Image (cartoon, rainbow, N blue to C red):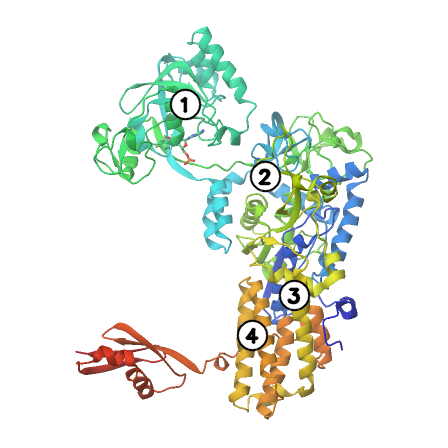
Amino acid sequence: MPDRYEPSAFEAKWRERWKEADLFLTREEPGRKKFYGLDFFPYPSGAGLSVGHCRNYIPTDVLCRMRYMQGFNVLHPMGFDAFGLPAENEAIKRKSHPRKMIEEYGATYRRQMELIGITYDWSRSFSSSDESFYKWTQWIFELLYKRGLAYRKDATVNWDPVEQTVLADEEVVGGLGWRSGVPVEKKLIPQWFFKITAYADRLLADLDEIDWPEGIKAQQRNWIGKSVGVEFRIKVAGALGGDSGGGDTDFQVASKEREPLSFRVFTTRVDTVYGMTFCVLAPEHPILDKLLAFADPQTEQDVRDYCQGAKTLSDTDRQATTREKTGVFTGAYAINPANAELVPIWVADYVLSTYGTGAIMAVPGHDTRDYEFARKFGLPVKEVIAPTSEPQGEAALPYEAKDGVMVNSGDYTGLTVREGQLALGKWFEGLGIGERKTQYRLRDWLISRQRYWGCPIPIIHNSEGEEELVPEDCLPVELPEVEKYEPSGDGSSPLAAIPDFVNVTDHEGHLARRETDTMGGFACSSWYFLRFCDPFNFEKAWDKSRSDYWMPVDTYVGGAEHAVMHLLYSRFWTKVLFDAGLVSVKEPFAELRNQGQVLAQTPYRHPREGEKLPVGEEGIQITFEEAKTLPKDQVFMRWARMSKSKGNVVTPDEAVAEYGADALRLYELFVAPFPQDVQWQNEGMQGQVRFLSRVFRLVEDLKGIRNPFWKASIRDVPPAGKSAEIRRATHTAIEKCTSDIEKFAFNTYVSALMIYSNTLHDLTRSPAESDAEKLALNEALESLILLLSPGAPHSADELWETIGGQGFTYQAEWPRFDPSLVVADKVTIAVQVNGKLRDTVEVSAGAGEDEVKLAALSSAKVAANVEGKTIRKVIVVPGKLVNVVAN
Ligand code: ANZ
């Protein structure tokens, strides 16, 4: 055996042996507890893995390895999220077919994951583009459809002009497509939706039941955006035409003609209604046409121009707090139902047509957006809520806080905000002009894509123009193998151009047309974790006994960027499947952990004249090659996310070749706390090489005392002196490593191993003399190797073999912690005089009450504090405190 860490001498050998032994096949033995550890479903990109990706996979692997050694049946699978735009776009670029490409890329991922020793059970692997998988994605689509949770409607959608497809709201970031980075356009096309809004309340409430990072929960709460308020009707002064909104019958329209024209507003602050000084309509509001009938031609033109302009902006841009408010007066007035005052009606794009009723009562005294608007256009600002019952004057406005008292509010003056909300809500309900209402920001999930590389939607449109589900026994609707699959550019899917695919017969044998949209990739990743529970099932998507056994995923690990898409959709599907009786869990992922990003040094250059800097950047990012060609003073280095596009990637292949897989693994764990970003430096792995070499030397030095039967005898030898010290170090390390791995504190897990090996090194400078010491060292030797095993499994198996261990460390039992062995020799006791802390004293851990009293009374500080007084009583709280009562 080498006396230092020489990865090239043994790492590949161990990986071979693990493979030959099928070591990582999922165990489903009865009588054991289960553990399901899962990493986010990756899209296998052509660039392969970087050490950045490994920061996701290695920690999960460490946890799964420990769980297995602790005796759990462990499910630790991996597959590929193969459908979707990234694969399709890359295939178009490479003039290849996505299926072929995905196979190649998946193979590279697998090779790299094996290279770093991850324990995936590859027998369970699949790609979401496998027919045996997407058949069931379609089956779940049908389930949603039958339950009224999948529907098609014309919708104004986000059109990505580069990707040539529709994007979900969640895929539009700051008005830009999340992959293309170009502004999205609005387009009206028929689209498929999943009705996630029907589950808004449960998606919100059940967040309390899961152990997820608070930040992610907050983002989901925000995204769902529950608001409780009042929706009420506001009349337009001097105009007839009824309540706007549309969808009425002819009769309703006719009778409305004689009623005053009105519109509805949604507010969470009905208590501020006396402070309404104007109203604002979204530029898309349907009432505008009617209002403009009363307007002079100039006003009408101004309003129409303004509304036209608003179309080019995304909702996010419209609501950006940094943007100056814009708007136009419509010439019309509304009547405040609380005090009958007339207030002007404006149109402004900060009011969205997609939220609430698309119209607001504006209260500039208590809403910052309205305040900015009022200031810009010279509209009055009125104080109606004050911190106390005393009005504070205009200088204190806008006052947005909800703790306050109503002022200047007619009969309601003096009520608190809460009381006012209740009272006014009731009043409006009584008048029949409004009702209390809950609004959600969440929108239904747009699922269809006009692209080739996705799961076909199992619907046909029959000759009557109705939708029919493809019968279950005809699933899957196979994605046809085609030569040309580039987007058509006219908004329809390339599948629409394939007559063999499109032309079908309906259930009556009439000619019908197949749906040609495909599902976005988020459909596949909303249930893949269930398929892993029963991947070989050809009869069903999964057998309930298998999902009952493995679900929920105990620990789910991936990047924080998926807070609102994948992580919300999966929760929604799981709830639907629960309602259908197909799974027994309401939540798919019991515990979620997000790793920090890996950053690498990346060259940037200063912007040239007239060049604009990308948002949030200090310079223009360039390649390392480009950096070499530029003068030194134009180039600077910054930490940026490691990614292929930045050209700053370190691959696991390079790291393993230079430092070894175990050094890479330990460095990934050690470099920073798991959730934190990492500044990657290859040299950091050298430290781990040195640490592992120290462990190899230590084992080499100690292996002479090896006694395979130590476990049988150690219980008979009470620890004392040095053997007690060794055992204390061992059990401290066992406790620390176990709880650190459980807590995702992998960096301190590695440092605990370092401390432990150093302590052992110090304790074994002189050879072991007593039997007790030798037994303690036997325990230490095995424990060190086994505790090391999840982090550095190749080295652990090599060392294990050296000391004559049986089988692989993965199959060995995780060291058991004995708390009685870590009790420290000495404890520190606080000493109080009359309840005030005066000193601390050290006593031996087993000291009796008299010994503790004596130590306390011997303290000079105590003596000084009782001088001239009589000691009445000495109270001892064992192991903690002594209180001397004196007067
Ligand atoms: C009057 C008011 C007074 C408001 C006040 C707030 C404070 P959340 O909590 O996000 O649901 N609002 C309603 N519909 C809107 C729309 N379509 N576009 C833009 N803003 C809209 O926000 C609810 C509040 O946002 C509502 O309550 C309304 O302004 C505004 F002191 O009404 B509030």
The residue furthest top is 297
What whole-number distance in Å separates the C-alpha atoms at marks 2 and 4?
Answer: 47 Å
Q: Nearer the viewer, mark 1 or mark 3?
A: 3
Kind of element beneath mark 2: loop
Q: Which residue shows up at 48% across the image and 28% down it? A: 323
Give the position of the C terminus as an image quadrant: bottom left
Task: Give the CA distance from mark 2 to mark 1.
Answer: 39 Å
**First in residue order: circle 2 vs circle 1:** 1
Is residue 587 positioned above or below 737 on the image? above
**Mark 1 sits near ligand 1, with its Cβ under 8 Å away:** yes
Q: Say which of 229 and 255 sits in front.
A: 229
Q: Is residue 811 visible?
A: no
Q: Which mark is residue 734?
A: 4
Real-space Cα separation, disc 1 to disc 3, in angstroms: 63 Å
Kind of residue at badge 4 = Ile
Q: Is residue 7 above or below residue 388?
A: below
Residue shown at 38%/13% (left/top)? 240
Q: Are marks 2 and 3 in contact (CB under 8 Å)?
A: no
The N terminus lies in quadrant? bottom right
Between circles 2 and 1, the one closer to the viewer is: 2
Question: What's the residue type where badge 3 is placed?
Answer: Gly
| Nearer the camera: disc 3 or disc 4 | 3
In which quadrant of the rendered view does residue 481 lie? Answer: top right
Q: Which mark is residue 280?
A: 1
